[in-house]
Amino acid sequence: LLADAEMLGAPDPELAATMGFSGFGKKARTFDLEAMFEQTRRTAVERSRKVLEAREREKEEQAEKEFRSRPTDPSASASSATGAGSLLTQRETVCGESEDSSDEELTGPSMQSQTSAQGPAEDTGDDDEDDEFIGPPLPPGFKDSDDDNDNDDTEEEDNNPIKKIPDSHEITLQHGTKTVSALGLDPSGARLITGGYDYDVKFWDFAGMDASLQAFRSLQPCECHQIKSLQYSSTGDVILVVSGNSQAKVLDRDGFPVMECIKGDQYIVDMTNTKGHTAMLNSGCWHPKIKEEFLTCSNDGTVRTWDVNNEKKHKSVFKPRSVQGKRVIPTTCTYSRDGKLIAAGCQDGSIQIWDRNMTVHTKFHCRQAHAPGTDTSCLTFSYDGTVLASRGGDDTLKIWDIRQFKKPLNSAERLPSFFPMTDCCFSPDDKILVTGTSVKKGGGSGKLFFFYRETFQKLYEIEVTDASVVRCLWHPKLNQIMVGTGNGLAKVYYDPVKSQRGAKLCVVKTKRKERQAETLTQDYIITPHALPMFREPRQRSTRKQLEKDRLDPMKSHKPEPPVAGPGRGGRVGTHGGTLSSYIVKNIALDKTDDSNPREAILRHAKEAEENPYWVAPAYAKTQPKTVFAEVEPEDDETDKPEWKKRKI
């Protein structure tokens, strides 16, 4: 047992090293607590002494500065000297007190706890000082002045709404050559879609575009029908396309069809009994809350709601009526911001508003909102939902409180509008109303007008281009204004400071360089089972192959231009390449007049007489002397009777 105990207590070093527990035989480290405490105390005393010295030095420097700034006076100098002496004695007494206190700290129950408590306290004090004063001290009142400036700027912006208009910079997107009649931005502001009278719908991705500003997709979803309206849904995953036909379409984000509304039976008189529209569409929009529902209005005199998941039939039908109860055509329609109301502007100048769940009777209506016989081109609700703005075909812009719908709150006149989709929109803060004006060709510039909502005072105007301004859109997230014009342009106005993303993403990207060498590439045919003697070497890299083709004189040979004039250098001229072209050329060059056949034959009489070959030998015996018919004078017809004269 003793032997075993000895083996356990003192293992063999070789065995221990082999088994991996060689550390068991080492002695434990011993710590001298008194030495550690003494070292900690000295460190704390030294640190407090340095802090106190630094503070006293600052006070001395400040006193010296004050002394230099004052005029020389013996009494003042004496007082300053005594003050300096008192400072020195105070410093010595403080240092002595700190030493005495540190000596007294040794007599306590637990030195470690006291030092540990002192250390963090001093550290936190220093950290607080560091947090408060980083770098050189700020001049007095600096923070207050900065805050005041910020507050002044915000107050100026509130008092002057013109500064909120982001128009310092602009980019121009070339949609085509015809009118841009539809604009749409997805809720996040990443993609813009434009549609026009050229039947095209173009997709623009701000994050994917570079400074060349090219659309990444173009399509004609409705064949040969003008695009009337484009709008993303509230989630941004589908697009409503309203064109000049009677069937609205829904596309996904990439332009692929999702659904197409059914066409109604045009031989049924009551439009409620038809499953869809029977005449040209005028406008459409998505429900702001329900992502599957949208609204359309048509020349068949109805406003219909639809469900994306049911293309066979509409959900509900609203039929606007005139004062006499007759059918009237709605030219524009929209939902309220909460989606509970449906508003329509009609050709008789009225604005009619229904509850979404009550299709028969209108909830609000104004019979003489605009001039009868004009197309009300746009209705839009404010963001707070209490005010409705209408853009009329009678060159006016009006704003209404739907609770007091008999009279407009404000109106602006002399705003020409030649298009049935000229629209208006509210600013993101709901304080400004924006609309565009139309001009005739060569009649000046189309403008974008900004009106203050409360007073309808004209705040600002932007000259957009030398054509009409049809569409305008002020996106709340991007804080950028999109404008569609009558000459095929889509302009984006933005401010580098006030605007977010959007046009700012693409203007900073440089144009991609076109690789011209790609035109020299040849198709590579892969034949895995061909015999080795017929197998082509496999292409390793397209770039290397391009460089190799460039060095090959045959592959990089520029084609010869066509020969002008007569051929040269072994090449036949353009007009003499074939027999037919040669004959055509000779026919064109033959300028002889063959209008008189007798003269044409007699032209060869001398040659035939000298060298008879075809006709003369046959008549040599029977008619050795050629006899020709004599030419009768045309005047002989005057002597003939009337019935014998040639009738012309």
Image: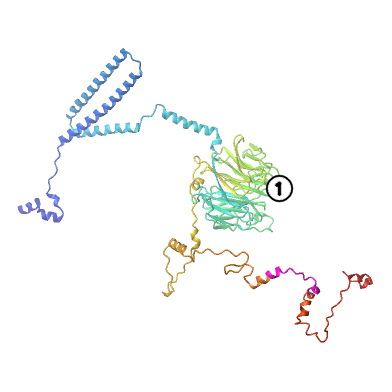
Task: For the C terminus, give its image quadrant.
Answer: bottom right
Task: Locate residue 73, reporting x and y percent.
Answer: 33, 13
Residue 387 included in the magenta stretch of the image:
no
Q: Secondary structure at mark 1?
A: loop
At label 1, the amino acid type is Gly
Task: Provide residue 203's location: percent of width, then percent of height.
Answer: 54, 53
- Indicate left or right for 590 with 636 as reference: left
Q: Give the extent of the magenta segment.
A: 585-600
Nearest the viewer among 312 and 550 is 550
Residue positioned 31% across, 21% down in the render: 64
Q: Is residue 430 left or right of residue 5?
A: right
| Quadrant in the rendering for residue 159 | top right
513 lies above or below 631: above
Q: Toward the viewer: 384 or 601?
A: 601
Q: Horizontally, is 606 left or right of 165 in the view?
A: right
Q: Nearer the viewer, residue 361 or 95?
A: 95
Count of marks placed on residues: 1
Q: Which residue is mark 1?
A: 325
State the residue in front, 438 or 396. Answer: 438
